[in-house]
Amino acid sequence: MAEIAYSVAGKVLEQLGSRTFQEISSAWGVRSDLKKLEDIVLAVKAVLCDAEEKQASDQRLRTWLGKLKDVLNDAENVLDEFQYRVLQKEVMKRYWSTSKKVRYFFSCPNPLVFRFEMAHKIKDIRGRVDNIAADKDKFNLAQAFEDRKITMHGRDMTHSFVHSSDVIGRDDDREKIIHLLMEQDAGRNVSVIPIVGIGDLGKTTLTKLVYNDERVARHFQLRKWVCVSEDFDVRSLIIEIIKSHVGSINENLSIDQLQILLRELLKDNKFLLVLDDVWNEDRNKWMELEDLLRDGYNGSKIIVTTRNNSVATIMGTVPTYHLDGLSNEECMSLFVKLAFKEGEEKQYPNLLEIGNDIVKKCKGVPLAVRTLASLLYSKVDEREWKSIRDNEIWHLKQNEGDILPALRLSYNQLPFHLKQCFAYCSLFPKDYEFKSLLLVQFWMAHGLLQSPDNENQDLEDIGNLYIKELMSRSLFQDVYQDTVLFYTFKMHDLVHDLALAIAKGECLVVTKKSSVSAGVCHLSISENGQEVTTQLERLSKVQTIIFKTEQHMSILETCISRFKYLRVLDLENSSFEVLPNSIGSLKHLRYLDLSENRRIKQLPDSICKLHSLQTLLLGGCSNLEWLPKGIRDIISLRFLVVTTKHTCLSEKAVGCLDSLRFLLIVGCENLKCLFEGMEGRLTNLRTLVVGGCPSLTSLSLSIKHLTALETLGIGDCIELSLMEMEGEDNQDLKLSLQNLMIEGLPKLEVLPQWLQGSANTLQQLLIGECENLKALPEWLPRLKSLHTLRIVECPKLSSLPEGMEALTALRQLEITDCPDLSRKCREEDSHKIAHVPKIELDEDS
């Protein structure tokens, strides 16, 4: 609770310290109250670090922190109303006609009345904060501002694929399980091998090693991996098994139709199916699925990983494989690998001795070892190591199923602002695949990101640093980066359990059986029905609603009317034909997700009243006819994903969004022109991606105006040549482009000349499926910062330009499915690229 109060206090102080509130305080006669509020909050924040350490053993302190958190949330909401008013005035000043301003004046509350009401709210909040703050002296809390900064450890991205060289101490286990897979069970077509062990002994990692082993891949015609977790729903599992083979499926098929598809898929193939992380103890559910699998091709196998022996007994057809913890020697080897840079451990024998004591406390659990090793990485202060070894958390009584002390320690060592970011991840289900871009926007919507220290950084940059820091501490795992745009990752089950425990009372996944406390502010709704609606009626200060299942319009209208302080509203995969006009009343809303709604045709004009909105997700809304005319009034919008039936997205459609940092235009089948009449706009845009627009013939935007653009991706636009801008004067262009991805442009014959404007900044150039690209330009070697060049499926390319050796920054060159170019590089151009450390040429050419 202290970390939440600390975070909200920080947001309140940041608002009060802004220029906006300095001006408002004088103009509206609330300067004295706002200054007193700032002083009180500052004094309270100073003792919250100490409060966090003491709250576990003091119920009165926890109660006080709860009251403090509530009143600070109220303060934030009141200050946010001021901020909304400022944004509204800015919109009126920029865009509204005189007649519209007059209509607004007579239809809305008198400004003097508004000032009076807001001044009264400020006085009330200041008094409440004052009363609660006065009680802090009862707890003898010491002042100590939290000052831990984000310091990146500089580790490389990892991938979800497990390499055997990265796994310690499981060679024997791997060979034994592979032997079980190869064995023929005379009495059964399909055998089930259960692997049992406590949380993160490495069951999933071991199974991945087996699953990806070449011998196993040769032995089975089909291999399927399904992560089950807590919801053993047979229909959903059938769908996931089929999807793992065909990619996508009509999920509205009847259960009989799905069963026919599954049997057809499995009948002639010896298959290996992994059911990872199974909790189901209902034998009837398993028998229902087993009936569909048992007639598979003779020699097929199922591996089940579980923490529960009862599950293994129900499902297994061979003796359970019990996975033991790693030996102390193996744990120490893993610890040294992660806690020190290679070879560095020899310089610190004293730290190795302390590390060995720490490893013994981890009791053979790899996750515990990894977490603490990551926490201590690059730290050489002996006191820090001893503080981990001697922490009192190791002495607390641990019951079976309790969260590992090592994870608690890792969490306790996080800076306050990262603690709340981590806790909010509990709103997403286990095994959820996070996308870095969207998680940063989610955190930003709740004001969890600290202001950048320099003008060259945006909040998005701060969010990415937060994610990388949580990765470096092993709190995120299975990291996979497919493109330069974003990366995905997951949370281990035990880490997710930790987030749930931390966020209890603040965040809640709502089911029909949930127990909802009045203080809950963030909801993920995974079921529907009257029981859920009744539970929502008990709440009033909700800031987040994530719908994980289809809901009726009535519950959406209830949420909008009841929860006026919403910051995040996630309606992904909904099928509402229209949004209620009342959506415009959510003046605090920062994040609105309508992705993959294939029925919605238009957005209400009232959505343009959301002046605070920062993120709007409309991707996959394939029947959306147009964007509302007043979209320019959403002046805070930074992140926009859009699919529309528009034929032209012009200045009035998106070019008026001056705050925009990220723009993704995807799946717009009718779109013919883009950015018409937008010269000199979108000057803050840093990422632009246009994809799946088969009718697009022109971007119609001079690249020289996009001076902040860092990443540009254009794909699957079969009528686009990128040559419409070549008539412009491209001399002396100074651009900031760092990443360029061009894919699926059959009309592209040469790279555009304007690319030379990024000669000093371009770092990654990815070209794919451009069947008519005939040559790389002679000026390519002038791209002095280029470190990655990837060329895929460009069959008419036959050689590299002269002077490639001038690309001294080039570290990776990949050429795939370009037969002539690959052959020429191997035979004749090898001297041009000999200086590149990593070269991948298509050997099959």
Image (tube, rainbow, N blue to C red):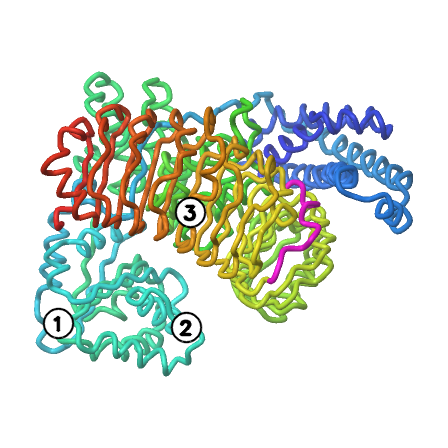
Is 533 left or right of 477, judged from the image as shown?
right
Q: Position of residue 741 (x, y in %)?
A: 37, 43
Earlier-in-chain disc, 3 versus 1? 1
Residue at point 35%, 66% (across, down): 240
Earlier-in-chain disc, 1 versus 2? 2
For badge 3, the amino acid type reads: Ile
Q: Position of residue 2 (x, y in %)?
A: 58, 35
- Closer to the camera in the image, 734 or 420: 734
Check residue 66 in the rendering and tell me which mark sits there, or answer none: none
Q: Is residue 168 visible?
A: no
The image quarter containing residue 679 is: top right
Give the alpha-carbon distance from disc 3 to disc 1, as whole Å. 46 Å
For badge 1, the amino acid type reads: Gly
**Residue that numbered label 3 is attached to:** 714
Q: Does the magenta-highlighted stretch encompass residue 632?
A: yes
Q: Dot 1: what SS?
A: loop
**Residue that numbered label 2 is attached to:** 250
Closer to the observer: label 1 or label 2? 2
Is 193 left or right of 260, judged from the image as shown?
left
Q: Position of residue 727 (x, y in %)?
A: 47, 37
For badge 2, the amino acid type reads: Asn
Q: Is residue 604 visible?
A: yes
Check residue 299 in the rendering and tell me which mark sits there, or answer none: 1
Give the alpha-carbon distance from disc 3 to disc 2, as whole Å. 29 Å
Q: Dot 3: what SS?
A: strand
The image quarter containing residue 821 is: top left
Give the residues in magenta.
625-636
| Quadrant assignment for the N terminus | top right
Q: Dot 2: what SS?
A: loop
Closer to the observer: label 3 or label 2? 3
Q: Does the magenta-highlighted stretch encompass residue 262?
A: no
